[in-house]
């Protein structure tokens, strides 16, 4: 048999996959017994139908809040750095590719046939030569990105943003030039049309650059999150990148892992369950098996599909397909991206643009109506049709802030780079803006608030407490009465899901690499201190196992004596009636859960086990509470000898009902071996982080599955609870209090009521009134909570109008991470948690303060950008047109100059606002109310138009008409003239004077915008408190302010003094005094705004503060 035959993958090769990709499907399949439906993320009315068709359909769907398009990356993470989130639309699969999916036979083969086909020994794994050969054949384990439609992409570049509006305006200007301008077409109209086309080209180039830079940032961020997997190679277990996997690799799957490739299970625990919702849309996990359960590979339970999540148990699998050859990769090749959906921030921007456009259309319509009904009849020839078209174009184009799209893009890019530097990864930058609105932050304890570096510090048999050193000394000195410490060591080592990495066996215990979660790893190291874990495991053969999960809160192993063990292997005690064929059940878990299943406890004096009487239980509970009050996590270890005769022959171990029998019959009447206490210290930065979050108006709660006393102790160390001496419990919440009488939470009231401590059992019994009362507390600790209860906590706070952020790192946190407005996972957490989260903190938890700060900053800077663009870009440009139409004055600002202001001189200063640093006090303001605090409101518009716009218009208008007056063209003779000038006026001299007056208006507006720029940089602070020119202060300086002002000034002179533009655009140079006077006006505007800010700071509840933007 050839090597190719041995290593055949029973599927399409990459060439055939590529051949079938990206073609429009021609027909739907009707001859297959199964169908593939690629469904969108909408869990609406079709949910019931999808559930009913569970056994004959496969749907491709993801969590509603996660971008399904972004799942197709080699690291199997969902990341996006863009202003859109794309959702997939249902499409039909191609006949050939689907047929090949249905023909796969990996599930039909036995384990031996699988290993023979892939040339792998399940006990050794692949060797280095095999890996090299297979890597060359199959390539990296990564799904190829979809091909882009270049034509549609460039159409988007051209028409994106305001491109379509500018294109229509340019066409109208060409029409106004010819044929409507015949017989004397105005060159200025042609120039305006060409200028608009140039602007479209520049915008296209910018959009293309932005897309390129976005993809580059996304790729760099993706590389920061390498997905790793535990695999067996050359007889050694090792962590490696998922990209390195090849068919034939033996991989180990544990709770919280995401399957990195398609695998065939060769060994599973009884409780192995996989969440296939990423592929099937089903909410119920599917149990994993070794044997085939369905003839279709897509339905059978002995195949684990790439991208699915392990939510319970553990297993071992052999990789059968990687990269594009996986089921996930095949379906991804047949999928097409749908239309983007609007995010929260985009809706705010769209709302702003709609307001501005509606105003522009209203004014344009008013101009047209006045011209048709009045001006064209009474003052024929004053405004011709071409001039009317140019006026309408000027109103529409000048009113819209063309600099806004560039500002939004660059602002998000700046935020992205800042967050990456602070090791914060976002799936969508819009998430950061939402985080800036969060007012309730719920945090898991273990691994999030704590270091997740657990250490066993104490052990106890009944009330006989000892540390690990003392316990070992007893065993070495032969003073271990009744072998109670030896039993403790055996249960710690054997009833454990963690394992040592063999490659580090020569290192000290504390430095050895352990594969497993933090709790099991700590207990494994503790067991190794007492007795070699390998020796303990050698005494036993595993028969059945139930891994720890957040619902049962215990781990269980059923074991039989190995052939090489002594007649009475530990933890079997001298007093136990243990036969050679008997089994031992070992259990480890939460004391409050396992105590209900225990009937005996080891006697620390060495005698037979004691009955677990109420008096003995008090002694044991006292030890538990003592440790818990010090912040230790307490676990109970138990055992039971199971006579072989008690096992039913009708229900073998591999029978589905065996787990029920274990739970109801065997896992009862246990003997307590002892308690162990683990310390997981809080992260050192947590107290300061909690203080900052509280100062930012965010309530910080702890939500944990740990014991209440432990949770309160850690919460007090973290600053979440002010003092543990004043605590309220559910009994302090009246059950039937009327909602109207409940005092709502007030962040200004620092004299708060005591902290509230609620347990999972409390949550199950609380009434709506009690929930309403609980939601008003400033400090809350939720203890002993299940995943469902964590989810309910999030929902209850959301139901009361709160924006909830949830942090966590475990599988049990995933439901609440998905449900929260912003889910935040720790970088070292489980794959499931990182999949569910919107934000990932790679290193320090304190970086969440940076994310919150910049979430608020991106919204603040966009408001500042809009506020800068409106006064000159719309209001001050609108006034010359209205005065021209209503009062018959000459249009004192030309249409070309309006366009130049909007798309040239104002754009760079507006973009410079995106680089503003967080304003002092940004994290002392309350969070933004998403229902009330909009990007644009009446206060904002009043400040933009009533204050800034009015000042700029009056100053510019006065300068322009003052110049005309000095040239002999009196204002009194121009008003209401409607083109009927006095006979003594020289028309050529008048036209030249108007051209120069327009340039004076142009200069004045641009100069005063510098004052607007410096005033708008801060909302409350003085320019002296946030000096943009303070280059020595990293937190205040903005390198881009001065270059943007100089660039704007250079464009101003360029368009006004270059002869070509003077001839074509009819611009003119201005007298020297009109170059410097605008800067005096700018200084006056800045001074007025400084005065306004002073009174706002001095009287924060005064009139000016109430109407401040």
Image (cartoon, grey):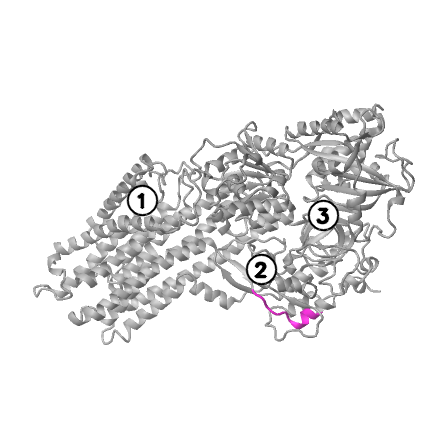
- Name the foreground residue: 729 vs 667: 729
Label 2 or label 3, whichever comes before in sequence order: 2
Q: Residues within 10 Å of mark 2 (few under 14, many from 20)?
A: some
Label 2 or label 1, whichever comes before in sequence order: 2
Residues at marks 1 and 3, CA–CA distance in whole angstroms: 58 Å
Task: Report the quarter where the N terminus lies.
Answer: bottom right
Mark 1 and mark 2 in contact (Cβ < 8 Å)? no
- Name the foreground residue: 160 vs 735: 735
Instruction: Indicate the position of residue 694 as horizontal and vertical percent values.
Output: 48, 36
- Please say whether residue 54 is visible from this viewpoint: yes
Q: Which mark is residue 254?
A: 3
Q: Which mark is residue 43?
A: 2
Q: Residues within 10 Å of mark 1 (few under 14, many from 20)?
A: few
Residue drawn at x 79%, y 24% is 473
Mark 3 and mark 2 in contact (Cβ < 8 Å)? no
Q: Which mark is residue 1107?
A: 1
Q: Quadrant of residue 249?
A: bottom right
Tell whether 354 sits left or right of 531.
left
Q: Secondary structure at mark 2?
A: loop
Residue drawn at x 70%, y 38% is 519
- Name the foreground residue: 1035 vs 832: 832
**Part of the protein shown in magenta:** 89-99
| For residue 68, above or below residue 239 | below
């Amino acid at each position: 048999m050839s090597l190719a035959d041995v290593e055949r993958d029973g599927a399409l090769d990459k060439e055939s996959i590529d051949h079938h990709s990206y073609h429009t499907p021609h027909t739907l399949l009707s001859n297959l017994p199964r169908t593939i439906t690629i469904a969108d993320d909408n869990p609406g009315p079709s949910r019931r139908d999808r559930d009913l068709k569970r056994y004959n359909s496969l749907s491709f769907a993801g969590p509603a809040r996660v971008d399904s398009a972004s799942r197709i990356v080699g690291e199997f993470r969902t990341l996006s750095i863009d202003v859109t989130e794309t959702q997939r639309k249902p499409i039909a699969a191609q006949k050939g590719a689907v047929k090949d999916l249905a023909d796969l036979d990996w599930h039909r083969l036995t384990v031996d046939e699988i290993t023979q086909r892939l040339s792998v020994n399940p006990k050794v794994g692949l060797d280095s030569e095999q890996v090299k050969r297979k890597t060359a054949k199959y390539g990296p384990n990564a799904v190829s990105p979809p091909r882009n439609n270049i034509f549609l992409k460039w159409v988007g570049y051209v028409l994106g943003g305001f491109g379509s509006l500018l294109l229509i305006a340019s066409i109208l200007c060409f029409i106004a030039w010819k044929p409507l301008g015949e017989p004397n077409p105005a060159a200025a109209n042609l120039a305006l049309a060409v200028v608009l086309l140039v602007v479209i080209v520049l915008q296209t180039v910018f959009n293309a650059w932005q897309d390129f830079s976005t993809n580059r940032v996304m790729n760099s961020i993706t590389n920061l999150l390498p997905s790793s997997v535990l695999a067996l190679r050359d007889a050694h277990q090792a962590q490696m990148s998922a990209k390195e996997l090849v068919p034939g690799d033996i991989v180990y799957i544990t709770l919280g892992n995401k399957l990195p490739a398609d695998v065939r299970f060769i060994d599973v625990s009884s409780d192995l369950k996989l969440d296939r919702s990423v592929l099937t849309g089903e909410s119920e996990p599917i149990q994993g098996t070794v044997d085939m359960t369905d003839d279709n590979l897509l339905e059978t339970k002995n195949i684990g599909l790439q991208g699915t999540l392990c939510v319970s148990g553990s297993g071992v699998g052999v990789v059968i397909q990687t990269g594009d050859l996986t089921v996930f990769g095949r379906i991804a090749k047949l999928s097409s991206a749908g239309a983007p959906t609007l995010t929260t921030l985009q809706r705010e921007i769209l709302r702003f643009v709609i307001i501005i456009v509606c105003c522009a259309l209203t004014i344009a319509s008013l101009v047209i109506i006045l011209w048709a009904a009045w001006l064209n009849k009474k003052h024929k020839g004053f405004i011709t049709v071409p001039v009317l078209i140019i006026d309408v174009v000027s109103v529409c184009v000048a009113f819209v802030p063309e600099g806004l799209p560039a500002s939004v893009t660059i602002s998000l890019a700046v935020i992205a780079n800042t967050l990456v530097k602070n090791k914060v990864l976002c799936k969508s930058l819009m998430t950061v803006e939402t985080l800036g609105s969060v007012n309730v932050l719920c945090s898991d304890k273990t691994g999030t608030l704590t270091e997740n570096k657990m250490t066993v510090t104490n052990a106890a048999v009944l009330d006989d407490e000892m540390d690990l050193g003392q316990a070992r000394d007893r065993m070495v000195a032969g003073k271990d009465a009744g072998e109670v410490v030896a039993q403790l060591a055996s249960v710690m080592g054997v009833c454990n899901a963690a394992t040592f990495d063999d490659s580090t066996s020569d290192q000290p215990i504390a430095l050895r690499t352990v594969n497993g979660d933090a709790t099991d790893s700590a207990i494994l190291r503790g067991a190794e201190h007492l007795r070699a874990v390998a020796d303990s495991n050698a005494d036993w053969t595993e028969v059945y196992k139930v891994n720890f999960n957040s619902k049962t809160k215990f781990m269980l192993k059923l074991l039989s004596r190995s052939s090489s063990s002594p007649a009475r292997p530990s933890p079997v005690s001298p007093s136990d009636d243990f036969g050679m064929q008997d089994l031992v059940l070992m259990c480890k878990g939460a004391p409050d859960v396992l105590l209900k299943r225990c009937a005996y406890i080891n006697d620390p004096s060495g005698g037979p086990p004691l009955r677990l009487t109420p008096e003995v239980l008090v002694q044991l509970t006292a030890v538990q509470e003592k440790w818990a009050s010090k912040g230790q996590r307490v676990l109970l270890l138990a055992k039971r000898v199971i006579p072989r005769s008690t096992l039913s022959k009708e229900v073998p171990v591999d029978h589905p009902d065996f787990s029920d029998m274990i739970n109801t019959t065997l896992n009862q009447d246990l003997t307590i071996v002892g308690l162990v206490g683990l310390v997981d210290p809080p992260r050192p930065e947590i107290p300061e982080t909690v203080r900052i979050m509280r100062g930012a108006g965010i309530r910080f709660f702890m939500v944990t599955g740990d014991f209440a006393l432990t949770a309160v102790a850690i919460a007090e160390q973290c600053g979440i609870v002010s003092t543990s001496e004043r605590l309220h419990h559910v009994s302090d919440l009246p059950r039937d209090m009327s909602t109207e009488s409940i005092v709502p939470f007030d962040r200004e009231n620092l004299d708060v009521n005591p902290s509230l401590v609620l347990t999972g059992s409390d949550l199950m019994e609380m009434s709506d009134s009690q929930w309403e009362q609980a939601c008003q507390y400033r400090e809350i600790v939720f203890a002993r909570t299940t995943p469902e209860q964590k989810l309910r906590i999030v929902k209850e706070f959301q139901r009361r109008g709160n924006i909830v952020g949830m942090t966590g790192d475990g599988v049990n946190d995933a439901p609440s991470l998905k449900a929260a407005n912003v889910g935040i996972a720790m970088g070292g957490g489980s794959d499931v948690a990182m999949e569910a989260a919107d934000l990932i903190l790679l290193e320090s938890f304190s970086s969440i303060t940076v994310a919150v700060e910049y979430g608020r900053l991106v919204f603040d800077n966009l408001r500042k950008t809009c506020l800068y663009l409106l006064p000159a870009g719309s209001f001050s440009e609108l006034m010359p047109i209205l005065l021209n139409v209503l009062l018959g004055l000459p249009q004192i600002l030309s249409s070309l100059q309006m366009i130049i202001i909007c798309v040239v001189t104002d754009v760079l200063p507006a973009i410079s606002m995106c680089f503003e640093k967080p304003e002092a006090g940004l994290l002392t303001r309350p969070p933004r109310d998403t229902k009330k605090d909009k990007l644009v409101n009446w206060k904002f518009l009043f400040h933009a138009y009533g204050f800034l716009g009015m000042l700029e218009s009056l100053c510019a208008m006065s300068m322009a008409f003052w110049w005309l007056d000095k040239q002999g063209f009196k204002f009194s003779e121009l008003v209401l003239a409607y083109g009927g000038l006095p006979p003594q006026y020289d028309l050529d001299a008048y036209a030249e004077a108007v051209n120069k007056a327009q340039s004076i208006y142009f200069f004045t507006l641009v100069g005063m915008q510098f004052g607007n720029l410096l005033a708008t940089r801060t909302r409350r602070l003085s320019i002296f408190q946030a000096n943009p020119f303070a280059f020595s202060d990293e937190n205040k300086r903005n390198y881009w302010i001065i270059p943007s002002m100089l660039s704007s000034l250079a464009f101003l002179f360029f368009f006004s003094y270059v002869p070509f533009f003077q001839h074509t655009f009819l611009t003119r140079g201005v007298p020297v005094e009109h170059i410097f006077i605008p800067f005096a006006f700018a200084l006056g505007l800045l001074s007025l705004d400084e005065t306004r800010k002073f009174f706002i700071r001095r009287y924060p509840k005064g009139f000016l503060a109430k109407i401040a933007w």
